[in-house]
Image (cartoon, coloured by chain):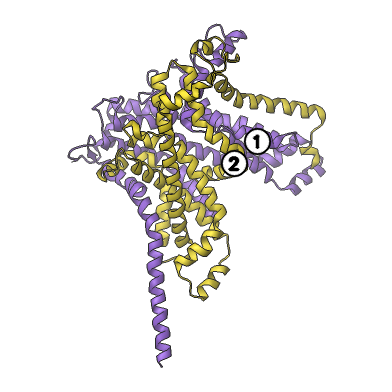
């Protein structure tokens, strides 16, 4: 056993070399972004892309934030992502609770309908989806985007929660039911606390997905006041396509929160996002 | 017996209240999902049978949209082009994932220094927004960008290579962007497959005198089959509906000269037109294309769903 996974010195060296090579592949683009976002003008970016900035120009970030509307984009992205998390955690946990614990005639049918959503990506139905959102008068509103993005996360979330719930015992609920507890109480007092780890997973998944989503806002939002960061970055790219140092600063503003969150909770990110990716 | 009667009435009303509360708990999620996800998917069938530019009256045309896409040269050629390019796109990505991903996962499974750190670093691009990654790499491989500067400086290229400006390289470059972004996901899936290999099997193979490579080849790789299939299916479903990188960098016209056109961009262009001020929108045709694409990925998607279902 040890003989397989343990390495001698020379092998260790070789493995380290390969690992570092891939780390370079991953980190060099990020590094180039940081270096170049701090340069005072685009000439320096073109002349010496890997050279140190001279002088270090931190004001690029402030400029992007203020002049290029990033404050607004950032606020919109936050509103969308937080609302989606609240909506999805609530709706998916209540739905999963009923489907897993209180089966009735037709509950299997509902579950299969959710399964349908896991199978066929909503992007393929962009024409009918656009039609529905428009006829509800939700076009070009944050509410519309929030509802559509939340709905697109529902199938995966319900799936994760139902399978999690099948794994926990029903004893507590049975006892509470004996005492006459009703579904609301059961959900709020027993199921929700028990499901906390799985709910944290779907909350993380929903937040990352909603924060990163580009396609759905692209279809449903027109006015720039409603743009989230993804669309804002695209607009920014049209305006500043020559100003690379500004472009890099904008990209880093968009990535910043994700990088910080990932560094703080890398284990949860890796586990949660992998699980979410597998269920898709 | 007044006591009994009261008891049964209480019990009955408990049942009723239970039913009401159950319905109330179920409603928000089912409503949200059905209005903004399930019903649009069902409406695909209906919309694919009408001629409708997205506004005004719908005209029922039967299977005309499908006939258009499958036989009319203008649409058919676009469709075939998009489909073939989509297959190339997919093949490059899956090749990267299975070769580089398996290699790195294998190395991560050895007792190397700092393998937890490496694991985190390898995963780093995955949680980032596709939009940010697309623009970052777009600038990075630009003829005037850092990569080309390094290549020409080290004499690896005589002149800057227009990775995204030439028809020959742009699709492959896009696929490599995708691979760079999601490699961490493939590594983690394969790694968990490797770590799940039963230790007694490995020990038995060692006792039989197998070398490290033999053990890996005959004990570890066969067990990785399901992980490989899983990755393939997930990527397949994703690349046949998601064209974010291309929409972001190339726009719906999928330049240069449609050499990066895949099903996602073709679908988008059909529904909303190529440029912002276009009038060439066709929701009926878009629904038909969406339905055809769904049909193509259906086997893979059903496989994925059944696998999830078995686990539930």
Q: Quadrant of residue A259?
A: top right
Q: Residue furthest top?
A: B158
Q: Colour of chain B?
A: purple
Q: Residues within 10 Å of mark 2 (few under 14, many from 20)?
A: many
Q: Chain of mark 1?
A: B
Measure the C-alpha gap from mark 2 to mark 1.
9 Å
Q: Position of residue A122 (x, y in %)?
A: 38, 42
Q: Is residue A142 above or below residue B255?
A: below
Marker disc for residue A270 = 2
Q: Is residue A102 visible?
A: no
Q: Is residue A204 above or below residue B261?
A: below
Marker disc for residue B82 = none
Q: B79 or A247: which is nearer to us?
A: A247
- Label 2 in the same subunit as label 1: no
Q: Are marks 2 and 1 in contact (CB under 8 Å)?
A: yes
Q: Is residue A82 above or below residue B54?
A: below
Q: What residue would you read off at disc 1?
A: B119
Q: Is residue A123 left or right of residue A17?
A: left
Q: Position of residue B49 (x, y in %)?
A: 25, 41
Which chain is rendered yellow in the image?
Answer: A
Q: B281 or A179: which is nearer to us?
A: A179
Residue drawn at x 39%, y 53% as measured from the top left: A113
Q: Position of residue B213 (x, y in %)?
A: 74, 34
Q: B202 or B1: which is nearer to us?
A: B1
Q: Chain of mark 2?
A: A
């Amino acid at each position: 056993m040890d003989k397989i996974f343990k390495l001698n010195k020379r092998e260790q060296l070789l493995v380290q070399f390969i690992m570092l090579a891939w780390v370079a592949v991953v980190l060099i683009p990020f590094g180039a972004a940081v270096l170049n976002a701090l340069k005072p003008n685009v000439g320096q970016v073109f002349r010496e892309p890997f050279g140190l900035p001279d002088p270090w120009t931190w004001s690029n970030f402030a400029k992007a934030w203020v002049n290029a509307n990033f404050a607004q984009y950032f606020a919109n992205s936050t509103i969308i992502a937080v609302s989606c998390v609240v909506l999805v955690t609530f709706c998916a946990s209540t739905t999963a609770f009923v489907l897993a614990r209180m089966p009735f005639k037709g509950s299997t049918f509902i579950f299969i309908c959710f399964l349908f959503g896991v199978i066929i990506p909503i992007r393929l139905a962009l024409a009918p989806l656009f039609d529905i959102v428009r006829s509800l008068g939700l076009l070009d509103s944050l509410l519309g985007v929030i509802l559509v993005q939340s709905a697109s996360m529902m199938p995966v979330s319900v799936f994760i929660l139902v399978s999690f719930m099948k794994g926990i015992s029903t004893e507590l609920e049975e006892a509470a039911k004996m005492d006459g507890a009703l579904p609301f109480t059961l959900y709020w007092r027993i199921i929700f606390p028990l499901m906390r780890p799985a709910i944290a997973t779907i909350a993380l998944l929903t937040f990352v997905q909603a924060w990163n989503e580009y396609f759905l806002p692209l279809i449903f939002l027109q006015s720039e006041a409603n743009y989230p960061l993804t669309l804002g970055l695209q607009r920014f790219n049209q305006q500043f396509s020559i100003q690379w140092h500004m472009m890099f600063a904008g990209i880093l503003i968009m990535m910043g929160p994700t990088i910080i969150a990932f560094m703080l909770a890398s284990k949860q990110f890796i586990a949660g996002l992998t699980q979410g990716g597998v269920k898709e | 017996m007044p006591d009994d009667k009261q008891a049964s009435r209480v019990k009955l009303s408990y049942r009723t209240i239970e039913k009401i509360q159950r319905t109330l708990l179920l409603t928000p999620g089912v409503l949200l999902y059905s209005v903004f996800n399930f019903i649009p998917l069902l409406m695909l069938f209906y919309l694919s049978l009408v001629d409708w530019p997205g506004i005004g009256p719908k005209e029922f045309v039967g299977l005309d949209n499908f006939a258009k896409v499958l036989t009319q040269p203008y649409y058919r050629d676009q469709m075939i082009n998009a489909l073939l390019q989509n297959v190339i796109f997919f093949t490059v990505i899956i090749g990267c994932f299975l070769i580089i991903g398996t290699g790195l996962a294998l190395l991560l499974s050895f007792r190397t220094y700092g393998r937890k750190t490496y694991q985190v670093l390898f995963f780093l691009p995955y949680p980032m927004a596709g939009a940010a990654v697309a623009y970052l790499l777009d600038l990075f491989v630009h003829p005037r960008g850092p990569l080309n500067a390094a290549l020409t400086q080290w004499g690896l290229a005589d002149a800057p290579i227009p990775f995204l400006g030439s028809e020959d390289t742009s699709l492959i470059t896009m696929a490599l962007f995708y691979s760079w972004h999601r490699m961490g996901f493939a590594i983690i899936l394969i790694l968990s497959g490797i770590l799940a290999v039963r230790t007694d099997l490995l020990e038995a193979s060692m006792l039989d005198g197998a070398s490290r490579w033999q053990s890996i080849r005959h004990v570890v790789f066969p067990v990785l089959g399901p992980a490989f299939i899983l990755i393939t299916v997930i990527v397949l479903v994703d690349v046949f509906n998601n064209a974010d990188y291309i929409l972001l960098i190339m726009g719906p016209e999928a330049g240069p000269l449609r050499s990066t056109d895949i099903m996602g961009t073709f679908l988008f262009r059909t529904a909303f037109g190529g440029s912002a001020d276009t009038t060439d929108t066709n929701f009926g045709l878009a629904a038909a294309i969406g339905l055809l694409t769904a049909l193509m990925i259906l086997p893979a998607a059903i496989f994925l769903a059944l696998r999830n279902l078995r686990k539930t």
